[in-house]
């Protein structure tokens, strides 16, 4: 069987090891992987590349996605959905694997209305916010990036006391990154949307933390989704404190995938290919990792909001 | 309460974040942590240091153990056990937390025959071989070290084809590291004690792998406990192949702890302090991570052999 | 002889290897190193620690400074200078080594008016802006941090085309970091104070670069001393471009010192101790690396502005 | 002009940034770069690829060589030289740039007897042993790899005292790596071919070092070209010491190029293209970095032995 693969939405570390694992596993099963470039857009433009096992050994350590990615807002229109479905069938594909987030899965669901080609999703976003899954590809690498970033800042924090470092993390409105840094102990405090604290309270707590530090520094992680880092900074400097904003930015979602990332990538790939083979008539599904096991959920579940867990 | 902490046996990344977490959590609970240096030997020599929350922010990113570690073979003698128990009591400790492997827990069990001080164990060894626990401190960091090591070797493997790289991993007789590298896809093959393959078979399979590579290189991970790397190398070079032995050595157990390491370290510390507080008369116990949860097991269970799981 | 060492101003990677090298080399020469904590402030407060060779093996890989650092604005007053000079003499020191930037050397010069204790400076600031020296401790490490940061961002830049990444670097008003990234080829363009381009011109050039990229992304490094990153961002987004600000922040001056850092640190330490021993009556001096050699310059030269070199 | 580029001999970090810099600089000058795969072998097999500026942004952070490399022993035969020269001309190339070591330059010299195409060499080998050049591409990255390797081992060295770590470095018979580690201070001792010490003396010195450490550990770097690591190990363990061999292996020549590597790569590329343009009739030359400047030397000089400098 020819199986298409595309990476959709934003890039995440772990996409490349997952592509590599799909290619190797498909080869073992006698299938062929056809890479579709630039996400759903590549279906329309016909940008494809056949991936053989000898092509992939260099992929494992690469961040980003060798297939390129992107968003295709036009896919919300039935006309585009129908056209994409036709193009997919014209490629001679027996199935399509989509790596991405909830929006990407919705795109797959829309396509599936116009074609019988089985579409299987693999959660891939650093935000870790796919319903039903404890893990999404990119999270462990991004968390390690943040950890290394804070470690580096801590060198100055320890050498020059009495400072406040505001570290704004990626992760949209999700609190996973700021909270995990606090849970590890490398951040003294975290500010996340899930608890939506008032500015006064945040600033007061930070100042309290600093006082309790005996001349040490304070590191505060702030979710980018709060959109308040600058405000905290202004308030703290007005109060006479030495504060510094540190925005890790897109560094957090780049870089070599971690070991754990690659292990999940390999298992997600394997499960996706099992789902492809399975003809039980369940329709389009995505793989999740939940309670230590890999399972499948219907695409429609991806619209639900994953409840935040106060344990990383 | 004054709670003693020592790191015993070999060092493992994750020990320092765990010490830091114990100090911070103990401080929150109103306890004081007394670090005992050089493992059980420090009980006898009285080398101790009080650790306060302001001492520990620099610990999180350090590999090894700031308390130093070591083995104390004399602890197998009842006389030494009795002496150590007396010294512990003289220190005024209400409890003792031991970070180490099964041998370290056995030492705690021996001590407990001569004192009522509660002793709690935390699994800390890169070998990941503590009975009842899916995780031991050091494993994730050591696996990432191995991954980075293989990534670097792969640069030459991809640039110059037709080569065989034998990568000997740490991990004693356990197959976790070689197998995980294979599972990720960065090793083409692994040789582990659990399957105890014959030399002929191993060499034959490696040569087959190389033939299937179309001019690419082959990376083979070998457990140090096999003690066969040199033999495979000699056989392969005799057969005319370009082989190279790469021994990561003690690099694999050094270096900055990963994010996951630190999260486990924080949770192990928290659970150990809960166990200290619990007066249910269960005797000495060690914390385990099993099926996604943290639990306690009696020290005596640590002598059992953990079954190898063919999934990392 | 007892030789004092302090780290002054901001911390820089390379300070710790230099302290370690001073201790080892002093020990070989029969001298003793006394560490003074928190910069010049530690002279007044008397916070000192004797450093022996067995204390330092762990220092080499640490960023920041184990002696802590800081600024002492009061040192501009003659009264404080006199008091500090008296305290220094009371410590029984035969010489003082100061690691820091030009401000730190000026402090040493001021002190030297009140004491005959020889004071020797070692350039240590990531900004690489000490007059007469091609190198200052911290620069190579900080440049590698920036390189790694841009590499990570490039993963997204390559995966999702058509974007503009504004990367604001540390380095105050100096153009070394932004320019070096451009010189390497990892930044498509740099904006530095030395050429003080108009906003219109910068924004126009960035947009031109993007057009020349055929769907690729553009990475622009901007010196923090420009204080224009937000303005470029606003202008670019107004013009309809997808831009993102990435501020590496204090990460750039933290982290493990590079090999080159440590080699310079060892040589600076050696030359500083030679200067201490040399009784030629030259007064206080600082070590420089110029044209491939290590030399000494009078403290007074440090106030001069180092001309910017358009080659890193 | 069409300019060919090939990477010959062993791979070295810095080759890829140099290829990228050649492509960008050539494009600015109006030339086109044709990559020849697998070293000189690719001339015979005709494996070439046109490299455009948009192809190269991903190259900067890659170790190894995207053009692949290898040795072609047949190039010592005049028949092969003549054939290769004819094939080169048939490709329509105006010049050829060769990245590699002295053997690779000799290959170029041999070719030049049969063609007027200008051949320019760029020193690229981690061994840093090209006559007339203070630097060869790969050295800084490989030295940083070794440094990181020793740092990791030091974690165990510090945590468990009384041990001897023998660290065998790459670098063939050259002493640069072991000596630089000693010079930095992270190795307590180094054993290099240049001083060819007797085994007795080496073992005795190691044991003396350990005695002087007050319970600390000793790290000894050994050049692979000594071929004595196992012998030292056997002798030390016979004498009752706890020793461990650590062979960094091919890790040392892999991995992301450092900042300094990329800066040298950019300059080497620029100088090579200047040499290509220069029609002064000097024949084939290679670029060197000497005394802080970039210069050209005739290919024939590359056979000379570079004298070892006891300063890294």
Image (tube, coloured by chain):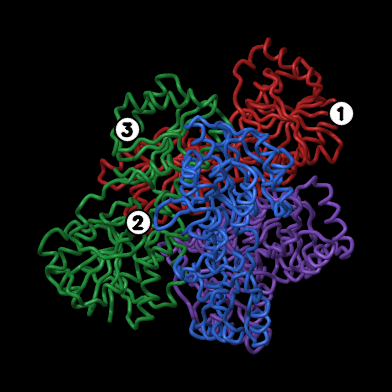
Chain colours: A red, B purple, C green, D blue
Secondary structure under tag 3 reads: loop
Real-space CA distance between mark 3 and mark 2, rounded to the nearest whole angstrom: 27 Å
Real-space CA distance between mark 1 and mark 3, rounded to the nearest whole angstrom: 59 Å
Q: Which mark is residue C135?
A: 2
Q: Position of residue D247 (x, y in %)?
A: 64, 67
Dot 2 crowding, Cα within 10 Å, few <14, some 14–19, many 20+:
many
Q: Are marks 1 and 3 in contact (CB under 8 Å)?
A: no
Secondary structure under tag 1 reads: loop
Q: Are marks 2 and 1 on the same chain?
A: no
Q: Which mark is residue C228?
A: 3
Dot 1 crowding, Cα within 10 Å, few <14, some 14–19, many 20+:
few
Residue nearest the viewer, comparing A210 with B249: B249
Secondary structure under tag 2 reads: loop
Q: Is residue B37 positioned above or below D253 on the image? A: below
Tell me if A56 is positioned left or right of A229 in this view: right
Residue nearest the viewer, comparing D179 with B105: D179
Q: Position of residue A306 (x, y in %)?
A: 62, 34
Residue nearest the viewer, comparing B170 with A23: A23
Report the residue marked by disc 1: A280
Real-space CA distance between mark 2 and mark 1, rounded to the nearest whole angstrom: 68 Å
Tell me if A35 is positioned left or right of D287 in this view: right
Point out the image quarter for the N terminus of chain C.
bottom left
Q: Is residue D219 positioned above or below A159 on the image? A: below
| Residue A204 lies in quadrant | top left
Query: Which chain letter goes with mark 3?
Result: C
Q: Position of residue D137 (x, y in %)?
A: 53, 53
In the rendered structure, which disc, 3 or 2, sits on the residue that comes first in sequence?
A: 2
Q: Is residue A35 positioned above or below A245 on the image? A: above
| Residue A52 lies in quadrant | top right
The residue located at (35%, 48%) in the rendering is A164
Query: Which chain letter goes with mark 2?
Result: C
| In this rendering, the label closer to the viewer, 3 or 2 | 2
């Amino acid at each position: 069987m020819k199986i298409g693969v595309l990476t959709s939405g934003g890039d995440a570390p772990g996409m490349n090891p997952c592509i590599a694992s799909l290619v190797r596993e498909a080869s073992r099963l006698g299938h062929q992987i056809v890479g579709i470039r630039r996400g759903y857009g590549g279906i329309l433009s016909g940008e494809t590349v056949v991936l053989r096992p000898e092509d992939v050994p260099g992929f494992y350590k690469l961040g980003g996605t060798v297939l390129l990615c992107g968003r295709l807002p036009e896919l919300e229109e039935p006309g585009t959905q129908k056209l994409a479905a036709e193009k997919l069938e014209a490629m001679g594909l027996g199935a399509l694997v989509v790596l991405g987030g909830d929006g990407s899965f919705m795109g797959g669901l829309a396509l599936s209305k116009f074609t019988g080609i089985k579409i299987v999703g693999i959660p891939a976003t650093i935000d870790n916010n796919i319903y039903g899954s404890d893990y999404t590809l990119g999270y462990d690498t991004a968390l390690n990036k943040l950890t290394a970033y804070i470690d580096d800042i801590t060198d100055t924090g320890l050498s020059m006391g009495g400072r406040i470092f505001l570290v704004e993390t990626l992760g949209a409105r999700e609190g996973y990154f700021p909270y995990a840094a606090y849970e590890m102990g490398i951040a003294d405090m975290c500010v996340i949307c899930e608890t939506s604290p008032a500015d006064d309270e945040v600033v007061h707590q930070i100042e309290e933390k600093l006082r309790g530090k005996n001349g040490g520094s304070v590191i505060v992680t702030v979710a980018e989704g709060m959109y308040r880092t600058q405000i905290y900074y202004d308030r703290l400097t007005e109060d006479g404190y030495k504060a510094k904003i540190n925005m890790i930015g897109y560094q957090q979602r780049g870089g070599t995938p971690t070991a754990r990332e690659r292990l999940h990538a390999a298992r997600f790939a394997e499960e996706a290919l099992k789902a492809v083979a399975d003809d039980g008539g369940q329709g389009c599904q995505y793989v999740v990792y939940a309670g230590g096991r890999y399972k499948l959920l219907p695409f429609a579940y991806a619209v639900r909001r994953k409840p935040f867990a106060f344990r990383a």
